[in-house]
Amino acid sequence: MQKKNRLKSPIAKGVSLALGVSLMAPIYAQQTDEVASASSAEEQSQLVEIIEITGIRGSLMRSMDTKRESVGVVDAITSEDIGKFPDTNLAESLQRITGVSIDRVNGEGSRVTVRGFGADFNLVTLNGRQLPTNSGLGRSFDFGDLAAEGVAGVEIYKTGKAHVPTGGIGATINILSVKPLDSEGLNASFGLKAVNDTSTISGDTWTPEFSGIYSNTFLDNTFGVAFIGSVQERNNGAQSATTNFFSEVDGGSIRDGVSLNGTQPSAGDIVGIPRNIVYQLSEVERTRTNAQLTLQYAPRDDLTVTLDYTYAEQEVSSSYNDVSFWVAQVPDEVLWSEGPVVSPLVYSEFDREPDFPHAAGGGGSRNELNSVGINVEWLPNDSLELSLDHHDSKSLREPDDEIRGSNSFLTVAGLRGRSRASTTIDFTGDIPVTTTTANDPLSPDDMRLTGSVYSNSWAEMNIEQTQFSGKWYVDEDQTIDFGMGLSKVANFEASSLVQRNTWGEPQASALGAMSDLMTPASLSGVYDSFSAGDQINNNFFIFDYTEVAARAAFLESLDPSNPLYLAPDINAVGSCGNGFCPDFEKGFGNNFEEDTLSAFLQYRYQGEIVDLPYSVLVGLRYEETDVTSSSASRNYTRVEWVAANEWIARDDGTEVPSGLEASYDNWLPNFDFDLNVHEDMKVRYSYSTTIARAGYGALIGSLSIANFIQYNSDGLYRATGSIGNPGLLPYESENHDLSYEWYYDDASYFSIGYFNKTVSNFIGGTTLEDVAIFPDLAFPGFGPLFEDAVAALGGTPSNQAIRDWIFENRGGEQGVIPDPNGGGVITGVSGRDNPATFDLATTINSADELTIDGWEVALQHDFVDTGFGVIMNATFANSDNEFNRLLNQQQFTLPGLSDTRNVIGYYDKDGIQVRIAYNWRDEWLSFASGPQPGYVAAYEQWDINASYDFNNGVIVFFEGINITDETTRGFARDNLQVAGVTQTGARYNVGFRYSF
C-alpha cells in the first residue's frame, strides 16, 4: 500500500522546495553548519539533500524531475525560475517554456499562446481551480494582472487528462500557490526594486516595487500561515506609427502614368493603397497589487484543511497625442513593388488638400480578481486519498477615469484647403516616413474641434466550483483516480458609447476658438529605435484633452448668435449632460451562464516489459453543460416609410429583455503510455480529446438590428440584423503526442516530441432569413395600402409613385401623415400591415476541420562544477490551412501559429548568479478579417538577470529587459503594408532581497 506523504511527489517537491531556494537562502546557510554536527547519517542525508537543490541548478533539477515523472506531456517552472528570470509577470516567465509564446501590451507580456492556440484556447487554473477572466466577450486570461514574485510554481499540461478541468486545447496552465506546511518554521523575505523604464517621455523614469512573503508554522507544525504581497508602480511610453488600413483593389483599376519605376500593376494583382498614417505618442501609468493569504491546519497526519484567498488589482491610466496624415487614395506618383501582391514603396498625392487631424485621448481601467477557496484532504486509510475543494472567484474590469472613461479621444484638425498641398509616404524603411508641403503654414488658429468618442466597458465573471476527487492505491502497481464536480460560470459584459459625429467642416468649431490651447511640437528625434526614424521630423500640435473638452462644452453653452457658438450633437449625450463625457450607465448588458456537471475515472498501471519499466494511464471524463444567455435589445415599435426607398425602424427608448438556452455534453477519453527504454531514457505516447468553449461574443444571444432598412435593386426591401448562438458546441480537438527524453545527468536532459491536433467545431456564419422578431412591428411596404396603390396604378409602379398615391388617396388612414411641402411619413400599423421580417446573421458550428502539427526540441545542459549551464528549446509548428496571401477571398485558418526559440545561458557559483535569456518568435497571423489578413513580424528579445548573495540573507540584483531595444511591427498582406510599428524601449531594475 502507498501512503500519502507531503513532498513525496516530484511536483510537490519541486514546488515547495523552490520556495526555500528563492526566499530562504540564509536558513539553508545555517543548515550547512548543522550538517557537521548532525547526530545521525539519516539527518545528514536529509540536510545534504536540501543543500544540493538550492540555486539555479537545483530549480532546474526539480523542473526536470516534474517533466520526467509526470504522465503525459507536462512542463513545469518553479519559483526559483520565476524569481530569477527578469520577468515582470507570469506570461513573460511562461514564454521560456517549449511551445509557449506571448502577446505583449505596453512592452509587457499579456496573453499566452501554446502550440499555436491563442489565449481563448487555453485554460488557466489556480491550484486546479478555474480562474475567472475579465475579457468580456472572450475567454482569454490577462497575465499582466499577476506578478511573478508571488507564485510557487506553474504546471503546463499539454496533453489532456481526465482529472484536469476542460477548456485548454492548447494547454491547461495551473498556477500553484505557497503552502505553509510544506516549509516548516519561520520563513520570511522582502524585497525592494527600483524600475527604470526608458520608454517614458513625460512620466517618472524611476518607479518603486515592493514584494514580501511571510510563512510560519505553529502548534508542532500542524498550523501554518503564509502571506505574500507585492505592489508595483510603472510608467512607460510607446511611440508608434500606424495605418488604419490598406484598401485592396485589382491591379487593372490602377490608372496609367503614375508609376515612377515603370512597374505597373496588372489585372489580377492585389494592390494595397494606404488610407492614412498616424504618429502617436502615448504614456501609461500602472499600479499592480497582488496579495495571497493561505491558512493550513493538519490536526492529524491523515487530515489537512487549507483555506486561501487571492487578490489581484491592476489600475491602468493612459494618455496620448497623435497626428494623422490622411490621403484620398488617388495616387499621383507611386513607386510600386512587384506583383502579384503589389505595395507602394513610395506613395504621393498632389493638390488633394486632405484634412490634417490631431487627436488626444486616453482613459483608465481597473481590473480586480478575488478568489476564496477551501480544500480538505483526508486519508481514511493507507490506500485511499479523498479531497473536497470549493472556491468562489470573481474577476472584473471597470472604468477608472471619471472624465475620460475607459477609452476616449477627441480631435482637432486643419480642415480641407488649409493644410497640405502634397503628401509623400515612404514605406521602404523600418518605419513609414511622411513628407508634406503646405499651402500655407499651419497655425494654431487653423485648428478646429471636430468629432469625439467616449467609450466605457465593463466585464465581470463569477465562478463557483466544487470538486470531489479521490485516489485509490489498489496495490503498488495500480491506482484509480475518480471524482466529480459542479461549476457555475456567470459572465457579464456591457459597454456604452457617446460619439459626436461632427467630423466635417460644417460641424467644426470656429477658427481661432482653440488656438490658445495648442502647443507646437515636433516628431524630430522621437523614433530613435528605428533606422529611418531620424527622417521623421513633422511638426504638429499637442493639446490637453481635458482643456479642449472643457472649452468645447463652454462653446456649446454660448448663444447661437455668437460666432464662436458650437452646435451640439443631440444624439451624443453623456452622464454630464453634454457630448464631452462618457456614459456611466451600464444598461442591461449581456449575461451568460454556464452550469457544468463533470465526472471522471482514470486508471494507471505500472509494470515491466523485459525488465523495462512502463506505465499506462487510461481515463474518461464526462461533462454536461447547460447555458443560458440573457440580454436586451431595443424595443422597436414602428417602421416608418420616410422616402421612396428608405424605411427606418424606430424604438421607444426602452429595452426588451430576452433569453436563450441550450445544452450539450462531451465524452473526453485520454490514454498515456510511457516506457523507460533505458534507465535514463523514456519514450511517451499520449492520445486525448480536449475541448475549448467558444468566446462569449459568439455565444451571447443579444439581438442587434440595423434600423435603416435598405431597398434592393431587385425591388425587395432588406432588413438585417445579427444574433448570437448560445447553442454553439465547444471546439473539439483530437490530440496525439509522441516524445523521446534522455536524462543524461542530474540537471541535464534532451527531449524531442511530435504533436498533432485535429480541431473541429470551428465557428462559421449563416443567415436566418425572413424572421419576424417583433410580431407587432408592422412593415408599411406590405399591406392593403401598398396593394391598393399597386392595383390602382397598374403595371410596376415606383415606390415614389406608390407613396404619392397613398398620401393623395389614403391620407386619412392611420399611420399616414402627408407633408404639404412634399414627402411625409407612412407608418406600419399592426393588424393591418404584415409584420416586418429580418435576415439575421448568426453563428454556427462549421464542418471545417484544421490540423496543426509540429515538433518540440529541448536541451538543458549543466556543466558540472563550473557553475555554467545552458537551456535551449525550439518549437516548429505547421497547419494544413495556412493563409494564402495570393487569394483575395475569405479563408478558414487559425491565427497565432508560429515557430519559437529560446536560448538561456546561466552561471551560478560562489554567490554569483547570472542569466542571459534570448527569446524569438517567428512571423504570425494575428487576424483574418474577411479577405484581408493581419500579421505580426518576427520578434526577438534579450533579457539579463544578475545577483550576488552576501550569505547573510541579503541578495542584490540587477535586471535588464529588452536590452537591445527591439521594436514590434505589424503588417497587412505584404510586409511593406505597415499596419503599425512601435518602440517601447528597454527596462532596467535594481534592488535587493532580504530573507530571514
Image (cartoon, rainbow, N blue to C red):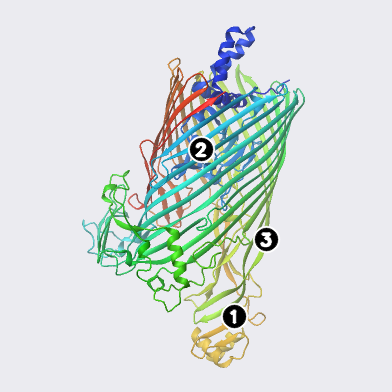
Q: Contact, CB < 8 Å: mark 2 with mark 1?
A: no
Mark 2 → mark 3, Cα distance in angstroms: 39 Å
Mark 2 → mark 1, Cα distance in angstroms: 61 Å
Specify whether 301 is left or right of 25: right
Judge whether 957 appears above or below 263 on screen. above
Amino acid carrying mark 1 in the image: Phe
* Dot 3 crowding, Cα within 10 Å, few <14, some 14–19, many 20+: some
Label whose residue precedes the other's in the sequence (2 or 1): 2
* Dot 2 crowding, Cα within 10 Å, few <14, some 14–19, many 20+: many
Q: Position of residue 350 (x, y in %)?
A: 25, 65
Specify whether 798 is left or right of 480: left
Q: Position of residue 982 (x, y in %)?
A: 38, 47
Q: Contact, CB < 8 Å: mark 1 with mark 3?
A: no
Amino acid carrying mark 3 in the image: Gly
Label disc, if present, on residue 782 of the rendered structure: 1
* Dot 1 crowding, Cα within 10 Å, few <14, some 14–19, many 20+: some
Q: Is residue 99 visible?
A: no
Amino acid carrying mark 2 in the image: Asn
Residue at the spot of label 2: 89
Look at the numbered disc 2 and give the secondary structure of its residue: loop
Look at the numbered disc 1 and give the secondary structure of its residue: loop
Q: Is residue 665 visible?
A: yes
Look at the numbered disc 3 and give the secondary structure of its residue: strand
Q: Position of residue 465 (x, y in %)?
A: 69, 43
Q: Nearer the viewer, residue 140 or 529?
A: 529
